[in-house]
Image (spheres, coloured by chain):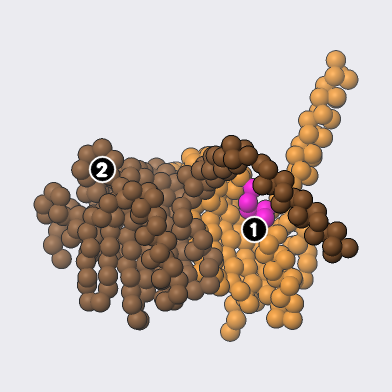
């Protein structure tokens, strides 16, 4: 019996070998084409952290932003907030204190930065915390399609990976920074391109 | 002519039934499990707010009108039967995978998680679904049913909550869920 199976396998191998390279190429192209939309539409490279033990994930979808953007408000600051919110597609935040996941996140984000062609906006080392912010610009210098922030917290500090997608202005984000981890650093970085501004004023 | 009408009605009804049966819905899940002793079921209407009608503006009233009722179904995990908890939770997750339920926010820590979904269009929301679960504790699903709820009306409703004189008695069944 085992011998029979073995011969079949051998045959298969022979067949596989006989498949010419063009067919193989075709298969590869089809496979890539099949996977491509996944990487575009089926969320980001970081979704594997969703639901992982030891990782807290927060995911906010476009519909939520659209809905929030539709809420009328008389407050001016809130209005600015809403204007930004309307332009966002999704927000993902992953927080972990596990060193293992941290190193994995580092690896994944490094890979992602290369594949998605993100540029480094700034890098801060703040009290042992390593904060890196990357953007994918679209159009003008302050226009951004994607913002990725990675806070590597060695030891007791938590590691935070944040990805914000949409089509927004970096200056608008300053309205958000107070509510986000690493907001302070982000604010400092954002002030760079256009000088000190923002509704919040100095701290 | 009459026969035609009858036929049309029957056809429409059967179509409706068929569409209901095509896949499990939250409604079916609620109906099926609300009688079960493993679950705690609770139906609330806006009565629970015990609002003083004179204090409500027309706008607030209009917002409240879009809200019909709230159904809550909670399952308390049984330490002796973790498989059932997993099975029930998986069932709900499966139901919520339907495109009809559009995810708004999801929070997940591996051990516990929560998510908010809605049904309908952004400014004509028919239903909100809140799903919260925690390993070893259980899960709860809250359905907020309404008609053409809009983000604005929801904000208005929330502000009305401040005025409400909540009828705590109606929430009593849920106390069982909260460990002392």
Q: Is residue A185 magenta?
A: no
Q: The magenta stretch spans which residues?
A: B93-98
Instruction: Give the chain of mark 2.
Output: A
> Tag 1, which chain?
B
Above or below, B15 relative to B90: above
The residue under the point 33% across, 74% down is A153
Q: Position of residue A171 (x, y in %)?
A: 22, 49
Query: Would you name the residue on which mark 1 appears?
Result: B93
Left/right placement of residue A117 relative to residue A22 reads left
Instruction: Give the drawing colour for chain A.
Output: brown
Q: Residue at x 44, y 46 (%)?
A: A62
- Residue drawn at point x = 81 percent, y = 24 percent: B8
Query: Seen in the image, is A86 located left or right of residue A76?
Result: right
**Outermost residue toward the left?**
A195
Spot the residue most to the bottom.
Answer: B180
Q: x, y (%) of residue B20? A: 75, 43
Q: For chain B, what colour was chosen?
A: orange
Name above or below for residue A59 compared with residue B13: below
Callouts 1 and 2 on one subunit: no
């Amino acid at each position: 019996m085992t011998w029979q199976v073995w011969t079949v396998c051998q045959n298969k191998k022979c067949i596989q070998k006989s498949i010419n390279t063009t067919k193989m190429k075709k298969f590869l192209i089809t496979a890539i084409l099949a996977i491509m939309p996944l990487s575009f539409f089926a969320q980001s490279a970081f979704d594997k952290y969703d639901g992982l033990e030891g990782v807290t994930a927060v995911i906010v979808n476009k519909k939520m932003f659209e809905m929030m953007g539709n809420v009328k408000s008389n407050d001016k600051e809130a209005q600015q907030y809403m204007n930004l919110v309307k332009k966002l597609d999704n927000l993902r935040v992953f927080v972990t204190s596990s060193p293992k996941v941290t190193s994995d996140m580092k690896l994944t984000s490094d890979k992602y930065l290369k594949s998605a062609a993100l540029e480094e906006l700034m890098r801060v080392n703040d009290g042992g915390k390593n904060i890196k912010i990357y953007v994918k610009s679209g159009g003008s210098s302050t226009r951004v399609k994607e913002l990725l922030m990675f806070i590597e917290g060695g030891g007791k500090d938590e590691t935070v990976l944040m990805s914000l997608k949409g089509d927004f202005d970096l200056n608008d984000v300053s309205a958000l920074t107070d509510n986000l981890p690493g907001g302070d650093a982000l604010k400092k970085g954002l002030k760079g391109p256009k000088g000190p501004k923002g509704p919040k004023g100095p701290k | 002519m009459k026969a035609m009408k009858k036929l049309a009605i029957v056809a429409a009804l059967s179509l409706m039934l068929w569409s209901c049966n095509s896949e499990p819905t939250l409604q079916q899940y609620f109906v099926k499990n609300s009688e079960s002793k493993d679950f705690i079921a609770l139906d609330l209407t806006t009565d629970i707010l015990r609002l003083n009608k004179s204090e409500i503006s027309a706008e607030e009233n209009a917002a409240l009108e879009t809200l019909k009722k709230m159904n809550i179904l909670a399952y308390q995990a049984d330490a002796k039967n973790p498989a059932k908890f997993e099975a029930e939770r998986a069932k709900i997750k499966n139901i919520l995978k339907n495109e009809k339920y559009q995810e708004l926010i999801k929070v997940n820590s591996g051990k516990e998680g929560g998510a908010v979904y809605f049904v309908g269009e952004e400014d004509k929301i028919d239903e909100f679904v809140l799903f919260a679960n925690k390993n070893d504790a259980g899960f709860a699903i809250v359905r907020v049913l309404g008609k053409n709820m809009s983000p604005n009306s929801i904000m208005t409703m929330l502000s009305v909550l401040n005025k409400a004189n909540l009828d705590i008695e109606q929430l009593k069944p849920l106390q069982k869920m909260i460990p002392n």
